[in-house]
């Protein structure tokens, strides 16, 4: 699942710079990889980008200063006037200085990739910054023994680039629309559950764009959207789904099978539910349980009755202070709410579709 649901990725330009720890400066490329090179080269970068966009550890970030050096370079590279060679060289120099100060960060290569893709039906340009860490590879060779017998063996190749079956340790993806933002990957030096490593973020002069409270609110908004679109299920099924969503949306993507057990949703409703949950960004799925509970406690249960009656009850309202009772003979429902203080905040006229605000204060 990706925050950016980018489709039809096409590589436009790629430039590589080498970042050796034991050298005072990077080894720069003076030109991008020629467009008429082996197509498999560009397919290599396309597949790495696609895989990284699906990585659940990717987080949305924002530049600390939109006029800062890193932000301006990235904006320039995304524009028609941007110089890929000089702009990427500045980024490579900055990244090289960062890794020389940190012994646990390996040498590698920086790939600066301009690519296009479609997102929600619109095509736009993107910039990818990929740190390609070296690895050891083996190449099959045929040699001859002293007895002049041929045999197959392996030759060790140093400084091999990661295959597309390996996930990249560090990468960043930048776009302009709908707003100028980044998607950052950094698998090394975890600082705690759900925390992203600071190395690549500091290199880009960026910060996490999401607060825990924002993530919790996004989960709650998703729950409300699900319940609204599935309101036709009826009060009983709707109530069961509501309770399961309240329990399930706490730091992980809820399992659709668990949510719908015993409810028997129609296939189209189950697909609708799955699609809405797929839209949840990874940050929302990492929200701490405590923060989620605090945000849920701010919610109100809304009662709508006859003649436009509307009453709100905070979910944290003491259970012993309210009761609901349905009389089968009369068909009426009685809701009892006990409060020491009751205040009416004036009167006003309204249109039929407007809500009337009634505040209830507990002791």
Image (cartoon, rainbow, N blue to C red):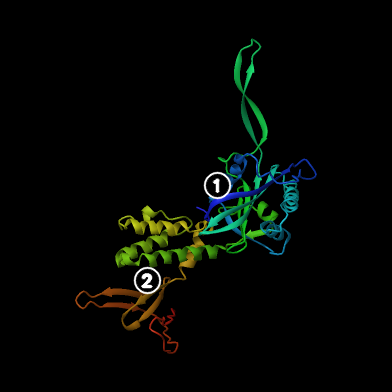
**Please, what secondary structure does the residue beneath circle 1 have?**
helix
- Where residue 42 sits, quadrant-wise, is top right
Compared to residue 188, the image places residue 298 above or below, namely below
Where residue 30 appears, as percent x and y from the top left, is 76, 46
| For residue 64, side relative to residue 361 (left or right) | right
Whether tag 1 and tag 2 are in contact, CB under 8 A, the answer is no
Where is 125 relative to 339, above or below?
above
Residue 347 x/y as whole percent: 42, 89
Depth order, front residue of 110/37 = 37
Dot 2: few (<14), some (14–19), or many (≥20) neighbours within 10 Å?
A: few
The residues tagged by marks 1 and 2 sit, at their Cα atoms, a distance apart of 48 Å
Mark 1 vs mark 2: in front? 1
Counting from the top left corner in percent of width and height, residue 261 is at 33, 55
Residue neighbourhood size for the residue with mark 1, other residues' Cα within 10 Å, grouped as few (<14), some (14–19), many (≥20): some
Question: Helix, strand or loop at disc 2?
Answer: helix
Residue that badge 1 annotates: 51
Q: State which tag comes first along the sequence, 1 or 2.
A: 1
When asked about the image quadrant of residue 230, the answer is: bottom left
* Residue furthest to the front: 36
Q: Position of residue 180 (x, y in %)?
A: 62, 62
């Amino acid at each position: 699942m990706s925050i950016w649901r980018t489709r039809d990725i096409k590589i436009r330009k790629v430039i590589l710079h080498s970042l050796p720890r034991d050298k005072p400066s990077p080894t720069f490329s003076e030109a991008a990889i020629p467009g008429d090179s082996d197509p498999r080269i560009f397919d290599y970068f396309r597949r790495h980008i696609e895989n990284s966009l699906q990585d659940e550890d990717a987080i949305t970030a924002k530049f600390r200063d939109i006029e800062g050096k890193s932000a301006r370079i990235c904006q320039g590279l995304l524009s028609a006037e941007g110089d890929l060679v000089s702009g990427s060289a500045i980024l490579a120099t900055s990244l090289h200085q960062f890794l020389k100060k940190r012994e646990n960060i390996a040498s590698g290569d920086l790939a600066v990739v301009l690519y296009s893709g479609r997102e929600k039906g619109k095509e736009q340009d993107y910039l990818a910054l990929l740190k390609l860490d070296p690895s050891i590879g083996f190449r099959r060779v045929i040699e001859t023994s002293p007895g002049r017998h041929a045999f197959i063996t392996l030759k060790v190749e140093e400084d091999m680039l990661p295959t597309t079956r390996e996930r990249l340790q560090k990468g960043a993806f930048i776009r302009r629309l709908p707003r100028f933002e980044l998607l950052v990957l950094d698998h090394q030096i975890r600082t705690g559950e759900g925390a992203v490593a600071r190395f690549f973020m500091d290199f880009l002069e960026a910060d996490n764009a999401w607060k825990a409270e924002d993530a919790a609110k996004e989960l709650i908004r998703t729950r409300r959207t699900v319940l609204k679109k599935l309101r036709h299920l009826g009060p009983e099924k709707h109530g069961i789904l509501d309770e399961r969503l309240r329990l399930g949306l706490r730091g992980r993507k809820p399992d659709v099978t668990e949510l719908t057990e015993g409810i028997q949703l129609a296939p189209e409703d189950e697909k609708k539910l799955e699609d809405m949950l797929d839209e949840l960004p990874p940050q929302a799925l990492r929200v701490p349980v405590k923060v989620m509970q605090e945000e849920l406690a701010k919610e109100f249960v809304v009662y709508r009755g006859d003649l436009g009656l509307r009453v709100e009850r905070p979910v944290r309202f003491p259970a012993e202070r309210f009761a609901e009772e349905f009389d089968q003979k009369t068909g009426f429902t009685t809701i009892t709410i006990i409060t020491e203080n009751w205040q009416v905040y004036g009167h006003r006229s309204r249109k039929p579709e407007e809500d009337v605000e009634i505040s209830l204060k507990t002791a």
